[in-house]
Image: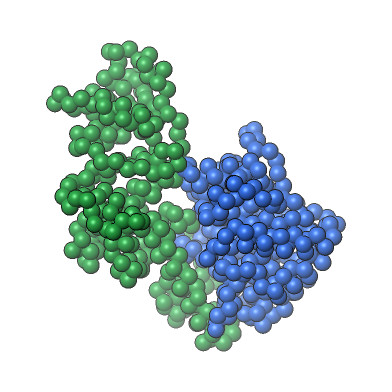
Chain colours: A green, B blue
């Protein structure tokens, strides 16, 4: 709740002036030459816009490259108008950008754009997610065979899974520095696993059953349920997760919760 | 909680620099002698990952100062409890020698503007800011430093000179002052006031840190960009400040168009020379 005193009224009027450009209410609060004061307000307005654009550009460099500067800046301006930063840490600003792009009329011709943004946000979140120590393999090995189907695993906090109907990983890779933007393939429905390992974010394409398995155990589904019932072998994917330090812990049937 | 790092305090006779990502590798490789390193607290609000790992690595060798840019001390909105929690967690993690914030506001109505916006210097704002500084100090269980900000506009409701407003916050709350000499110069130039007025107003004992940075001259006034070397007139004002205050831990800040590490080290060495000719302080701030 915002306070109701003179300070609150001034700050609300100031915020309108430096975000919406509505200077009607703030002028009464400003001292000195009115024309100069308005030009000085513009210094704040431009800095605020630049900070927000900069935060988005830093989290979504591939989207920025794909759409070009003018398109990106306009999208950033419209996002800020409907969903301005709600937190002082601008590293957290942009979680709503993929959804914004998915309904942005000017992005209609780039139907994969919102999914590329989702992938970039997954990368961005993976970089700063909590650290975790790996699973206790000795304790895991000691679990009796009859209890193994009921095991529930937890994944490393940096793990993100992006499932797309488009070849988003190929598009992402083609737009890294040094690449000319041409994807190696233009078909695919990419299931991409993103995680942090040795301080760097890594991404890998998963086969659909692997992705479904990771998605299921990420929700805390018991192993036998996550593995499915079609004779598909979950073991290679489980080993792959363990090899990259992405199994953070497990709980057996006795340790409920 | 047991200490994880050796206790380190800034050397008041030497300058430090702002720790910025482009310099991580060079700083780790060269390990120059510096009074302290300062970071923007919010850049390390992540729960994990490489940035925090770097900061902890540097903390093993240097005193660290956490300098907040987003707490919005002067906002009419309530203090954000998540922000305070993250700041407290970061302070617990890196055991900083100094924690500072700005005497400004940066959010209203739940929207964050991400700029250090000036306050009207009124009795209402003074009482409000003092309550908030006390709230932060109680939450962190330590005193903080508050910094005078650059201001491009002034408010018709202001009745208290800026220096006296800053001094009174320190007097009422027991917090220290982070005196930004560049901001004092920028404000005096932009509003036609005396840059020494803030030096006159402050109790020397409350000044716990000094900031130096470069501004940008525009047709509409000086802008505090932290994107250039310290200007000669700001060095002169710094000398005047030290003549009154004695040696105060000093930081060279650079945030835009960040140059090679050597440029920051040259600026820090220049501050070192001025610090060396200033006397030790009669009293040390809390």
Q: Residue A227 at what x, y percent from top left?
A: 22, 27
Quadrant of res B178: bottom right
Can residue A35 be seen at all in this image of the molecule? yes
Q: Could you tell whether B208 is left or right of A69 in the image?
A: right
Q: Image point 33% across, 12% down: which residue?
A: A144
Give the tally of numbered discs. Answer: 0
State the residue in front, B194 or A71: A71
Q: Image point 64% across, 52% down: which residue?
A: B37
State the residue in front, B74 or A101: A101
Q: Image point 23% across, 34% down: which residue?
A: A210
Can residue A60 be seen at all in this image of the molecule? no
State the residue in front, A216 or A20: A216
Q: Residue B2 at what x, y percent from top left?
A: 64, 33
Q: Residue A71 at what x, y percent from top left?
A: 30, 69
Q: Image point 37% across, 19% down: which residue?
A: A140
State the quadrant of the C terminus of chain A. Answer: top left
């Amino acid at each position: 709740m915002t306070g109701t005193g003179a300070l609150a009224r001034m700050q609300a009027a100031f915020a309108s002036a430096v975000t919406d450009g509505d200077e009607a209410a703030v002028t009464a609060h400003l001292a000195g030459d009115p024309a100069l004061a308005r030009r000085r307000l513009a210094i704040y307005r431009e800095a605020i816009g630049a900070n927000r654009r900069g935060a988005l550009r830093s989290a979504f460099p591939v989207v920025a490259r794909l759409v070009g500067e003018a398109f990106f800046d306009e999208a950033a301006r419209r996002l800020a108008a409907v969903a301005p930063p709600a937190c002082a840490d601008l590293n957290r600003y942009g979680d709503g950008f993929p959804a914004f792009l998915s309904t942005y009329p000017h992005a209609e011709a780039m139907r994969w754009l919102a999914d590329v943004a989702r992938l970039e946000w997954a990368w961005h979140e993976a970089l700063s997610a909590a650290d975790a120590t790996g699973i206790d393999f000795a304790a895991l090995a000691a679990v009796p065979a009859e209890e193994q189907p009921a095991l529930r695993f937890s994944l490393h906090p940096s793990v993100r899974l992006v499932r797309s109907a488009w070849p988003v990983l190929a598009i992402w890779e083609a737009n890294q520095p040094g690449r000319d933007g041409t994807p190696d393939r233009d078909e695919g429905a990419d299931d991409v696993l993103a995680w942090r390992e040795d301080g760097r974010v890594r991404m890998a394409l998963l086969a659909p059953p692997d992705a479904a398995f990771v998605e299921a155990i990420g929700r805390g589904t018991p192993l036998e349920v996550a593995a499915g019932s079609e004779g598909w072998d979950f073991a290679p994917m489980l080993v792959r997760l363990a090899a990259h330090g992405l199994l953070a812990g497990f709980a057996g049937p006795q340790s409920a919760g | 909680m047991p200490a994880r790092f050796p206790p380190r305090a800034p050397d008041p006779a030497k300058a430090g620099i702002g720790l910025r990502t482009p310099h991580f590798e060079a700083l780790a490789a060269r390990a120059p002698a510096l009074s302290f390193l300062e970071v923007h607290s919010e850049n390390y609000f992540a729960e994990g990952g490489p940035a925090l790992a770097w900061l902890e690595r540097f903390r093993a060798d240097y005193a660290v100062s956490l300098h907040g840019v987003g707490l919005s001390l002067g906002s009419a909105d309530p203090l954000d409890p998540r922000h305070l929690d993250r700041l407290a967690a970061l302070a617990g993690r890196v055991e900083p020698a100094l924690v500072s914030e700005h005497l400004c506001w940066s959010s209203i109505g739940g929207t964050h503007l991400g700029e250090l916006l000036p306050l009207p210097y009124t009795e209402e704002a003074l009482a409000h800011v003092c309550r908030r500084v006390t709230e932060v100090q109680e939450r962190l269980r330590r005193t903080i430093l508050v910094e005078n900000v650059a201001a491009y506009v002034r408010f018709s409701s202001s009745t208290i000179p800026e220096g006296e407003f800053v001094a009174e916050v320190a007097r009422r709350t027991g917090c220290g002052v982070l005196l930004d000499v560049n901001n004092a110069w920028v404000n005096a130039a932009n509003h036609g006031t005396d840059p020494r007025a803030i030096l006159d107003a402050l109790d020397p004992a409350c000044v716990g840190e000094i900031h130096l940075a470069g501004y940008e001259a525009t047709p509409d006034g000086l802008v505090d960009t932290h994107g250039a070397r310290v200007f000669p007139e700001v060095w002169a004002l710094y000398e005047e400040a030290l003549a009154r205050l004695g040696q105060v831990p000093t930081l060279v800040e650079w945030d835009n168009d960040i140059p090679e590490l050597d440029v920051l080290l040259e600026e820090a060495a220049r501050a070192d020379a001025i610090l060396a000719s200033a006397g030790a302080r009669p009293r040390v701030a809390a």
